[in-house]
Image (spheres, helix red, strand yellow):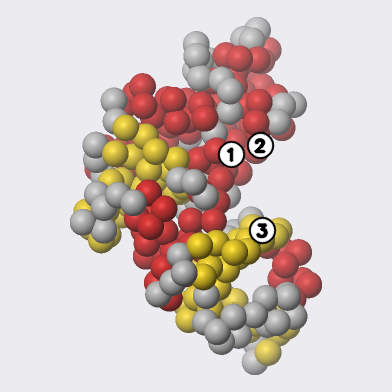
Amino acid sequence: MIGIDLGSRQVKMIQMQQGQVIRREMADTIGFYRQYGRVRDGQLQIDLLEAGWSGDQVVATGYGKMAVSITGAQQIPEIQAHALGAVFQSQRNSFTLIDIGGQDSKVILIRDGKVVDFLTNDRCAASSGRYLENMANVLDISLEELAGYDQDPAEINATCAIFGETELVARIVEGFSLPQLAAGVNYALYHRLAPLLKRMDSDLLVLSGGVALNQALTRILERETGREVLTLPDPQYNGAIGCCVFGGI
């Protein structure tokens, strides 16, 4: 069974047998499309055999699933794939899933293993991993270093990623320290998620997506919400894993 998550920034591929991951691969989305994509009948199509993957069943999801065709693949909605992957990985049935990807974020309310409601924010990069990447670049630090700061944050209020960079530069000029600035960036991301979380509240918050690796955000969520926060074992591959679950691993 092969599951593919066609993300806006990265393509994630998982192969599973009997509930176990036997192969995984992550590739830059644009590079992957350029290398393996062929335009047929006006649509970009991907042949997994050319990409070195083969399997008896393929399920795909993700940002690009409507515009890109995977030869022989069944396609399912992102919300469904991420919910299935999170239930499988967490072994929990009722929680709020927070999936923060490269260019959007999703907050999904799950009860008894099923999606009850969801909210998405895909209109602005300010609530996505791209925002953290840009701000880390302004601070000239890695994402790993950025993820270490959550105390005494500088106030960063801009709701736009571009204005956020301008505000961050202003805080630098004002003399705030690197730890304060980095903590302010992480808190800014939390503040953009907070309204969604209030509408999708649970005793347990589960994190997926690349931003789930940001330990500072985890600590902020625990402190500000008072909820238990769980990061999935394979947060970046959660959508692809959910595809395999749908296919009946």
Question: In the depicted view, which residue is nearer to us: 55 or 29?
Answer: 55
40 up-or-down from 8: above or below: below
Tell me if 97 is positioned left or right of 177 in this view.
left
Tell me if 173 is positioned left or right of 203 in this view.
right
Instruction: Residue type at mark 1: give it.
Output: Tyr
The residue lying at 66 percent from left, 61 percent from top is 25
Badge 3 element:
strand
Badge 2 element:
helix
The residue indicated by pointer 1 is 131
Q: Earlier in the sequence, mark 2 or mark 3?
A: 3
The residue lying at 53 percent from left, 78 percent from top is 58
Q: CA distance from mark 2 to mark 1?
A: 5 Å
Badge 1 element:
helix
The residue lying at 53 percent from left, 68 percent from top is 16
The image position of residue 107, as x and y in percent, is: 36, 48
Question: In the depicted view, which residue is nearer to us: 67 or 35?
Answer: 35
Which of the 4 image quadrants contains residue 198?
top left
Instruction: Residue type at mark 3: give it.
Output: Met
> Are the residues at dot 2 and dot 1 in contact (C-beta closer than 8 Å)?
yes
Of tags 3 and 1, the one toward the viewer is 3
Residue extending farthest right: 35
User: Does residue 124 appear in this view?
Assistant: no
Which of the 4 image quadrants contains residue 172?
top right
The image position of residue 68, as x and y in percent, is: 60, 76
The residue indicated by pointer 3 is 26
Q: CA distance from mark 2 to mark 3?
A: 21 Å
> Are the residues at dot 2 and dot 3 in contact (C-beta closer than 8 Å)?
no
The residue indicated by pointer 2 is 134
- Count of numbered circles in the view: 3
Question: In the depicted view, which residue is nearer to us: 153 or 209?
Answer: 209
Instruction: Residue type at mark 2: give it.
Output: Asn
